[in-house]
Image: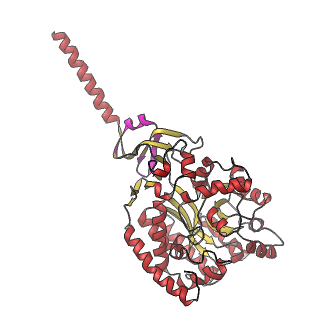
Amino acid sequence: MFASNNILNKTLLAASIIFATSLHAAEQVDLMITDATVLTMNSEKAIHENGTVVIKGNKIIAVGDAKLAQQYQANIVMDVDGDIVMPGLINTHTHASMTVFRSLADDVPGRLHRYIFPLEKKLVSRDMVRIGANLGNLEMVKGGVTTYSDMYYFEDEVAKTVDKIGMRAILGETVIKFPVADAQNAQEGIQYALKFIEEYKDHPRITPAFAPHAPYTNTTEVLQQITKLAKEHNVPVLIHLAESDRENEKIAARADGKSPVEYMDSIGSLDERLVAAHMINVSESDIELVKKAGTGVAHNMSANIKSAKGVSPALKMYDEDIRIGLGTDGPMSGNTLSTIDEFNQVAKVHKLVNQDRGAMPPVKVIDMATMGAARALHMEDKIGSLEVGKLADVIVIDTKAPNMVPMYNPYSVLVYSANSGNVRHSIVAGKVIMQDRNMLTVNEKNIIEEAIEFTKKVRQTVIENGEKVI
């Protein structure tokens, strides 16, 4: 009897030691997402059913199945009940501050030069940029965008709003040859950009950049100067390229019949730092030049078809391994800022223009919104997939909403059924900035109210200009 008790006691002691050791061995982490349909968007497009994502600090330290959760103790555990967990969406091209002009002159021909530029001349200010950026950031976070690439004026004001809400962004200070709100000419724009770059060069979530508006709105000398400065300061260059017939004509006249892409290559400005928005009017040889240069491409389907400028050969570029990702363009062009609202059109329009129902399958669309977009921005080593060592930019998509049930194929339901309202949680650099659609870093009500108040000034200006568009 004594021997039996002794054996029992030793067994219990051993079990206690094993249990204590296992508790001690469990690594302490900050956030763990469990019971998830994890779309990693890695090179194998691995999916983990009942999966787990583990975050420590601002990075992902583990991704796998349910057993993985037993190895960690987390300060916060998000059990998402089978919902889709995926990399945060990346908007490769927009003008966020223009939200305050949304729905103005939507169908006016030649709108950029006839309407938008004159409107901006009257209304763009630091205050307008801040108000519009706050609204744009809010819309993007609630639509699952965790990183975006922006071109506008007073980008230092945009940076302040990005910093506060907790997003990640590449922010390009516009350089253009005619007088604008923050510069009288291109050289002043360059100086503004240099000051902005110096201020934000070491920010963990904000990458400052040059943003020459387009080849035809800048001189050859200015474009070459920006290319040189971007290399010296190790920053990106954002530009509109091959977007319109007007651009084609002006560049052909300037450069002996060359296309805009050929022209940029000939002057040494088509390189790996460049992110080219639109790329609608491009030839086979243009695509080859872009691939050779390592230039990123922002595909903005909604804006392009709404303006009737054409459909970019984005599928061809994707299939030829061009660095291409999805963008929305500005809220006066595509009107919405979340790339989740692009998915449906990107898939369907490319099927139509290619006359092939199998063209642009959902997995390619989601890839272009995540890793493709990260590659376009030359950030694929940091974001775009859920992999160990990547920055923890993660979103959770509700799969129990009526429009998402049933979910046989997560890629299909995201592309053909989902909308921005299906995003439940948004996480950037390991920090939850939206939970159950509630903003945690900014006051949503105040942002919307301030934007509505600013529209009074916009309405007054439009009426004074004699425009009958609202």
Q: In this view, does 398 lie to the left or right of 211?
A: left
- The quadrant in which the N terminus is found is top left
Camera-side residue of 278 and 454: 454
Whole-percent x, y for residue 169 in the image: 52, 63
Camera-side residue of 363 and 160: 363
Whole-percent x, y for residue 30 in the image: 37, 48
The quadrant holding residue 463 is bottom right
Whole-percent x, y for residue 137 in the image: 47, 66
Camera-side residue of 466 and 89: 466
- Any magenta on residue 40? no
Farthest-out residue, front = 402
* Residue 86 showing in the rendered view: no
Picture mark count? 0
Q: In this view, does 42 lie to the left or right of 251?
A: left
* Residue 33 showing in the rendered view: yes
Please determine whether, in this image, residue 203 is positioned above or below residue 16. Answer: below
Residue at position x 52%, y 59% from top?
147
**For the magenta stretch, what is the residue range?**
55-74
Whole-percent x, y for residue 408 in the image: 53, 41
Q: Is residue 70 left or right of residue 292?
A: left
- The quadrant in which the C terminus is found is bottom right
Residue at position x 66%, y 60% from top?
297
Please say which color scheme the image uses.
secondary structure
Camera-side residue of 94 and 187: 94
Q: Is residue 427 left or right of residue 113?
A: left
Farthest-out residue, right = 256
Please determine whether, in this image, residue 401 is positioned above or below residue 300. Answer: above
